[in-house]
Structures are given as structure tokens and as C-alpha cells.
Amino acid sequence: MNLLLNILWIFLGGGIILFFEYLISGLALCITIIGIPFGLQCFKLAVFAIAPFGSNYVETENASGCLYILFNILWLILGGIGIVLTHLLLALIFAITIIGIPFAVQHVKMAGLAITPFGKRVI
């Protein structure tokens, strides 16, 4: 069932568009040395965006460290809020129809990862 939903997600839920958006953003951020940690988080979001059904994220054992907190604050200021609002808007659009509710749930799950990606791991 997850395979079927992931295939539908790629073509109907915006998965391929989100994947390339995160991939291009990650490559652009990795151009500078300072942006490499943020680019790596974009790559993590890209992998999660291509096949979110059957995937989840968990906090790592040292997720409450001061470096993770600082990077999450910088992430929010520099663009994380826009990503989260995009996922929540797409979730709202998909939630209008009954058929789109599974896609809306995945967008909400992705928004949870996109708001504070440092200190979390996709499983």
C-alpha cells in the first residue's frame, strides 16, 4: 500500500516538484562553506519528500544540544518558515477533498520535519 501511495504522491501530491525544489536548494546552499549544514538538511528533506509514506522521523539522542538549537533558529529565520507554510497550505488544499486526506497528513508530517530539521533523522 505504501508503494502505491508513494507512486501517487510523486505524480499527484507534488512529490517530484518538492524533491527537485529541495535538491536545487541544497545544491545552492552547499556552494558556500557556511551553507553546507543547511544544504545537507535540504537533502534530508528531499529524500523524505520523494517517498513520505512508510517513512517517519525521530529525534537523535543529542538533539537538544546548543548547536542544534542555534542552527534550527537560523533555519527558521532564513527560510524554514516559508517551507513550513508551503507544506501547511498544501495540506489545507489536499484536506478539502476526502481523497486528498492522506496527502494532507504527509504534508503536515513534512512540515513537522521542516520546521526544525537539525537533530532529527529520517527512518
Image: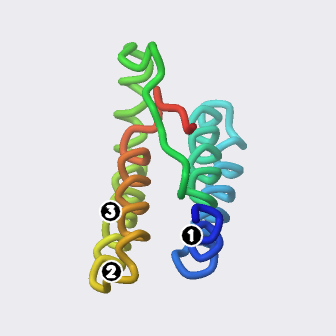
Q: Amino acid at mark 2?
A: Ile
**In the rendered image, which quarter is residue 59 located in?**
top left
Dot 1 lies on which element? Answer: helix
Picture disc at residue 14 = none
In the drawing, does residue 44 fall left or right of residue 91? Answer: right
Residue type, mark 3 in image: Leu
The residues tagged by marks 1 and 3 sit, at their Cα atoms, a distance apart of 23 Å
- Label 2 sits on residue: 93
Cα–Cα gap, marks 3 and 2? 12 Å
Q: Nearer the viewer, mark 3 or mark 2?
A: 2
Of residues 42 and 91, which is closer to you in this image?
91
Q: Position of residue 83 (x, y in %)?
A: 42, 58
Of callouts 1 and 3, the N-terminal one: 1
Look at the numbered discs 1 and 3 and tell me whether their residues touch, using CB distance below 8 Å.
Answer: no
As rendered, which of 49 and 22 lies closer to the eye? 49
Residue 62: percent from the left, percent from the top?
44, 13
